[in-house]
Every structure is written in structure tokens, then in C-alpha cells.
Amino acid sequence: MSEKDPAAVAGDGANTLSPMLLAVLANRFDGVVREMTNTMLRTGRSAVINSARDFSCGITTADNQLFATAEGLPAHTYGLNLQTAAMCAYHDDIAEGDAYLHNDPYSGNSHPADHTLIVPVFWAGRHVFNVCAKAHQADIGNSLPTTYHAAARDIYEEGALIFPAVRVQRDGRNVDDIIRMCQRRIRVADYWYGDFLAMLAAARTGEKRIHEVFAKYGPDTLARFVVEWFDYSEQRMRQAIRNLPAATVSRESAHDPLPPMMPDGIPVRVKVTVDPAAARIVLDLTDNIDNMDNGLNLSEACSISNSVAGVFNCLPSDIPRNGGSYRCIEVKLREGAAIGIPRFPHSCSVATTNVSDRLLNTVQAALADLGEGYGLAEGGIGMGAGFCVISGRDARHGDHAYVNQLIIGNNGGPGGPHCDGWVTYGIPVVAGLMYRDSVEISELSYPIHYREIRLATDTTGAGRRRGAPGVHITYGPSHHPMTVVFAADGQANPARGVRGGGDGNVGAMFVVGHDGSRTRAPSVGQIVLERGMWLEGLETAGGGYGDPLQREPERVRDDVLEGYLGLARARADYGVVFDGSPDDDSLAVDGPATAALRAELARARGH
């Protein structure tokens, strides 16, 4: 342990903390993170923060172990320890009152659009923790008005300002040179500065609350707590892994083709080894392709975070996510790989989504190959129409420029061994933890008009436990032309079902002209919508888990009544026959006819 580390043992013969105090302190630190989160949500300037909540807060120890994250997004929080390690490596004069800006994907960050404010926390002159506030920005100075530049051949074409743990406060005062650089280069400087202040307020709130915890419990008790909390978390993780069967499973999926960059798509390969005797899981990602000349390469943080998240998704939800439970998972990465450790200057602009979504899906689907009751299907994928970046000028406010990441669409969650997919899932790397934009707030904040957002019928991956549906979404500009930049997946390769479950639907995007004509939009690129034109999208559903013919007929009836499923699909996928109509209270399962049809379908499917 580092001399600065609060996890250093508090002296020979130190007493073990009581389970009650252990629980109190664990919740106290989670409470610190939640207060940081509330501070960000209430003070953030851009809608991507104050409406969609595309940000996360967390705490690491002074020796850079992930400590507390509360409801932070997995794509954000699992790499915070790499970022604080970079801060320590780059600076030998870290002091109280400092703050550091970090968005460098080559030294621990997720991707350049996620700006992280790191504040080292001191007690009695000793570095004890780091508090981190990470937020996706509305704009970061890219060469295109988007924070997802999928076509960027390298970091130079991407264009983002990169800050590798750069000091932005000393003695609690701003380093104005850095602030001016951002304000000069970023398109919506006032929004960026407002979000910067929100991140800073969240980090300083965390610092203050940790000081209060130290004042109440003292450094010796907290040093003991950190050791025991990590050990407890490791024990819980070891118990969960011991309940899994021993196996080595390989699985491959693929991101959609991206002509002309990647005409055959991007393969995603994982090998998962579960060793219950050693209580260890190894995720081998070394068999993936080399870095690509586009913005879809994963950063090291995203390669680790989104493969590990696939494991945690399949284990008991109350296992703490921290450096203790991490001790039981090894992630093997290769330098210079598209899924691994990127070589500078390959772009990682889209590292947090697309290929990361595929990676997470592939890991959790691989765990389903362990046997019945394990793993998950693949969740709905794709940064489709509801996740584009919009920009232009707002005629309502003096033609003021705007840029905003939309997070108003929705992909359906995956079916699991025991429950159907979660409707408000979003994308795999956030799995429902982000908020969806409010239509009303979005239309008030930006010159955009939504014509429809509705769940899509007959999109779900069929299964004993089905995936959740995707949505239809249509929007366009309310005044001046609007530029829309997108980097979509799931337009060719759907989310896959497991253990006999069906796949989700394939997504699509269309440009609707003034005359009502519909032209298919490319999955990666940008378009300009004039007033009276619309972008129409169909987003994707999650895959199903298990044989659809084993789904309870009454559940199928409920899906029909909810509008998730039409009568024809209920019959074809599930073998359920109804009497009556879904338009009134008369819809009822015809038991004998259902049994006969299911027997016929089972024979035809070779069951």
C-alpha cells in the first residue's frame, strides 16, 4: 500500500469493525457519491447532463482502487481508478485544493467526450481519497459538431481537445489558461463552462462530505474500514463465482458493416473462463483485430469496464462493485487492438457505445452458454435516431448556436433466466441507469419538435423470457435547418437471443422529405434536416432467453394486450391460439388449440 493510502492497516492488533459499522460506513460513502450526483443533476447546464444524466460520480482510494460508485454508469465508473492513477503518475506535487481535468483515452479515460474532474482529498496533510465527477459534454471541439465521430481516421481528424490529467485548480482557484482554451475551442462555450462548474461543485461537495466522515470516525477507523470493505466485497464475489459451473466458453458477435471503412463489420471475440475452485473469472479479449482507422476503437478503460460489466450483470446485484470484487476478475488485453489497449493516435471517439455494447452483450451471452439459469440474452443495441447529436442555430434565442447529444430513444432490454427484458433499458453499457430525455424539456431547450415516440409492436426477441421492445421515434427542426450526426449499430445485426430464444429486430433510420418520401439514412454520417423534414427511426429490441414454446400462454396474452405482440406473432413464435379480440375484454387463450399447435411447432423445430 502507498504511504498515502487510507487502506493501510491501522496498526497491529487493530480491532475488526462490527458488521453494523461496516454497513453504516459503506452506505455513508455511497451517500457521498449520491450527493455528488444530485449536485451534478441540479446544476448541469446542458440537457445531456440535467435531463439525460449522462454522467457519473465516484471515489477511489489514494492508491487508485475503485472504492464507491453508487448508481454510476458502468461505462464511466469502472475506469476511474485508471484516471486517478494517471493523475498520480503525471504529478509529483499533488496538493490539497487541486483539481484535475482528464479526458485522455490513452491514459485511463473512456473517450474524449467524457470530461472528468478529479479532486484529491486530504486529511491532516495526508492524501486519503480521490473524488471524481465524469460527464459527457455537449461539445468537445471535434472537427464535426458531434462527440461521436465514427469516421475519424485518427485523433487529429477527430479534433477533440485532450487533457491528460491537467491541473485546472490550484489552491482552490481556477487555472484560467485552461479554461480559456476550452472556451475558445468548444462550440457552445457557455454550456461547457456551466457543466464544468457543475462537475467542480460535485467534486468539492464530495471532498467536503469525506472530511465530515473523517471528523466523525477518525482516520484509523476509516483505514480499517477500507481494508475490510474490500475484503468483504472480494468474499461476496468469490461466493458468487463458486456457484457457477467450471467452463471455458468462446463467443463472437459483430458490429454492423461500415462501408467503406469496415465493409465486413467489426468482429467482437471473447473467451470466458470460469474457475469456481479458484473463485476466478478470466476474460480473454486478445483475439480481436488490430486498431482501426476510424473512431470505433475501444479505450483500455472501455475494454475493461464493459467486459467486466457483462459479468456483473449475471451475478447477484448486491455484490459491491469496487476494487475488492475486481480482484476475482482478470481481463487479458492486447496492445494495439481495437478491443484492448489503443495505440496513439488511433481514435476512440465512439469507445463508450457501439463496439462496447457488443462486447458487453457478448460476455453476458457467453455466460448463458454455461447452462440453464445462467447469463443473459443480448440487449437492444444501436445509437439510432434517438441517440444522435443535433446542432444548428436557435431562432428563438437570437440565432444562438446549440449542440446536444440526444438520449431520448430506447432499445429494449435482454431476456434473462427469470424475467423479461427491461423496457426502459436504453443501451447495454448503461442498462437503464441513465435517464431518458423529457420531450417537453428537450423541445423547450432546443428548436426540435417530436412527432412520435412509441413502443414498437412485434420487435421483441421471443423466448421463455422475452426481450423488451424497441421504439418508433420521429423528430425534426422547429425553425432553422438542423444538422444530425449519427453512428448507429443494430441496422444489420440484431441483438441475439440465447438458449433457444429469438433475436430482436433490426433497426432503421429514414429521412422523410417535404413530400412525405422516405429515404434510408446511412448508419454512420450526417444529414441536414430543413423545417418540414423529419428523421424517423425504428430502434431495437432485446433478444429472448429460452424456448418461446415454454412461455406461459397467459404471459403471451398480456403481451398482446400491452401491444408488444400481434396475434400473428403470438401464434408463429409462441404457438398460442386465442379466442376473442384484443380490442375488448374478450381475448382468452384457447388451451387445447394452443397445446396442439405447440406440439406441432416443437416437432417442426426439432425439439
Image (cartoon, rainbow, N blue to C red):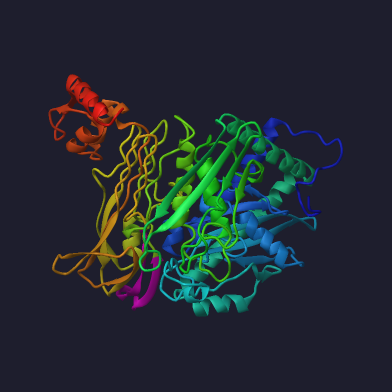
Q: Residue at x 55, y 30 (%)?
A: 245
Decide which of 572, 68 is in the foreground and name it: 572
Task: Tell me, yes or no, if residue 202 can be seen here.
Answer: no
- Give the magenta range: 387-404
Q: Is residue 557 magenta?
A: no
Q: Residue at x 60, y 70 (%)?
A: 163
Task: Tell me, yes or no, if residue 537 can be seen here.
Answer: yes
- 432 over 177 or under it: above or below: above
- 191 over 354 or under it: above or below: below
Query: Is residue 188 shown left or right of residue 24?
Result: left
Decide which of 290, 147 is in the foreground and name it: 290
Classify the position of the C terminus by image quarter. Answer: top left
Q: Which of the 4 quarters of the picture holds residue 496? A: top left
Q: Position of residue 239 (x, y in %)?
A: 62, 31
Q: Residue at x 66, y 52 (%)?
A: 60
Decide which of 260, 63 is in the foreground and name it: 260
